[in-house]
Image: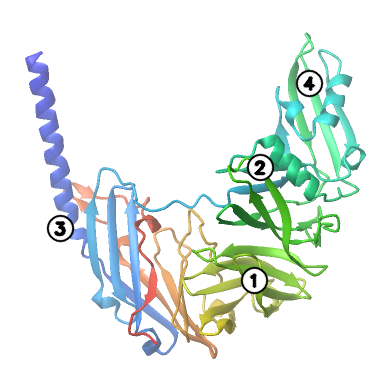
Amino acid sequence: MKTCLRLLLLLALLSAGLLAGATLAIQSQCDQVTVQRELLTGDPAVAEEIELNLPLTLAEQLFWNTAFPANHPEEAETWFGTYLSYKPDLPVDFGSPLSIDFVSGYMSSTYYLLDAYPDDPLSKPIQQAVDATPAGEERTFSSLLSDWYDAWPLEIYLSGYGLTQARLEELFQSYFSIPVLPDVTLEITVGKTSDGDIDSLVVDTEHSYYINPTTYSVAREGQLLFTFSNSYRESDGNRSLLLDGSHIPGGWGIYRLKFNQDGTDGTLETLCSLPEGSSILEFWGSLDGETLFLLTREESRLRLRVLDGEGTLLQTMDLLALSAEESYMQVYKGDDFFVPIVYGPRNEGCCYRFAVVAQGQEGWALAFTGDDREAFALGCGGFNWIGDYYYDNMDMAFNGERLAVRDSNQRNGSPFYLAVYSQAGLDYLATYTHSLAQDGCLYSDGSFDFNGLRLNWETGTRLLQWAETGS
């Protein structure tokens, strides 16, 4: 026993020594990060007040952060550290606490229901198919959803509040009575064992539409303000159409779920109604919930509404003209500015367009609009999706006159580009490459594999910012 303990102790000491030696070998080289810039167009002086960060991680155990002025990458400074485990002490955004789903509203949505089918919103046609299937056989039945329901069956999820699921569904189903599309076909396949037990149950809506609503909400004391997307695509995916909101009190708009004192019940009401033909794109609130923002497509335009925390309309402005071929992508939300982005077919010579909306002394105003036409011609067009796990590389900063955009299609952020836009257009565009992605670091016995190196937003480090001296 003593011999085993001595061996374990010896192995532990050897492991600690190897880890310390490897760490020293890495630390001796891995803070020597260099950054190279290639100027593609514009005046370098435009980037003089921009500061960039490159936070990288490998297996959540090795961490780098390289900081440098955009116009002087040779001044890059790198911090490097190692940890056996890493848990960022940052708030986690779990998204909207409310989710509204349309049952059988997906194109080719196939799902399996075993044992729990009586509780499914499609229980009526499912029950009929189950009753009509003999023991030991598999049968397929087809019918129209409109044969069973006048309004879309909804699946409602709400976290953090005390309403029962039954009350929640009753409340929303009665308020949001949205007529079922006339040609949604249900295909129900039931398989039974020789004893008559259900062996398999598949509900397929292959001939339906792309109906995948996104729910947006803003929580305030004792209430939840929300809306959800009201458009869908035909089965061929070519046209975007609007769902019928004429049976909703006040039509499409922003709604309020107001809770009773203990949160076990609530009421629904429409706070802000939209004109007929409006397509809801996105809805969000300021950090304190006192200002609300709603983006819609109306009259072939991207329209913004600014409301107070109770849903009273304060401002309405048109941001961009939208052709039928263009689609809304996303909005980048800064501290005192935001940037809605739309995109269209490349054959028009301009894929992405954007608007910069900033807060001023008299409220929110459109600063300028721009596009990626020139940047695309130089190989740096487009924008990545915000929050994408693999390519969460995009960051923006606005100094009142110019919008700086940093983006990359590489997980490790090399190369990445920095574009600076103003009312005049693209003022600056350059790509940056760092040596970590090229050279790697060496252990004492050879090269270190950097295949897993990725940009690390979890550090809370902003990738891009204007210096405080900026205008």
Q: Secondary structure at mark 2?
A: loop
Cα separation, mark 3 vs mark 1, equals 46 Å
Indicate whether 143 appears above or below 282.
above
The numbered dot on residue 265 is 2
- Where is residue 216, by image quadrant? bottom right
Which of label 2 and label 3 is nearer to you?
Answer: 2
Indicate whether 210 appears above or below 104.
below
Query: In the drawing, does residue 391 fall left or right of residue 7?
Result: right
Which of label 4 and label 3 is nearer to you?
Answer: 4
Upstream in sequence: badge 3 or badge 1: 3
Residue hosting label 3:
28
Cα separation, mark 1 vs mark 2, equals 39 Å
Cα separation, mark 4 vs mark 1, equals 46 Å
Query: In the drawing, does residue 168 fall left or right of residue 339?
Result: right
The numbered dot on residue 342 is 1
Whether label 2 touches label 3, CB < 8 Å: no
Question: Quadrant where the C terminus lies?
Answer: bottom left
What amino acid type should be assigned to the residue bearing mark 2? Answer: Asp
What amino acid type should be assigned to the residue bearing mark 3? Answer: Ser
Upstream in sequence: badge 4 or badge 2: 4
Q: Secondary structure at mark 4?
A: strand
The numbered dot on residue 191 is 4
Upstream in sequence: badge 1 or badge 2: 2
Q: Secondary structure at mark 1?
A: strand
The numbered dot on residue 116 is none
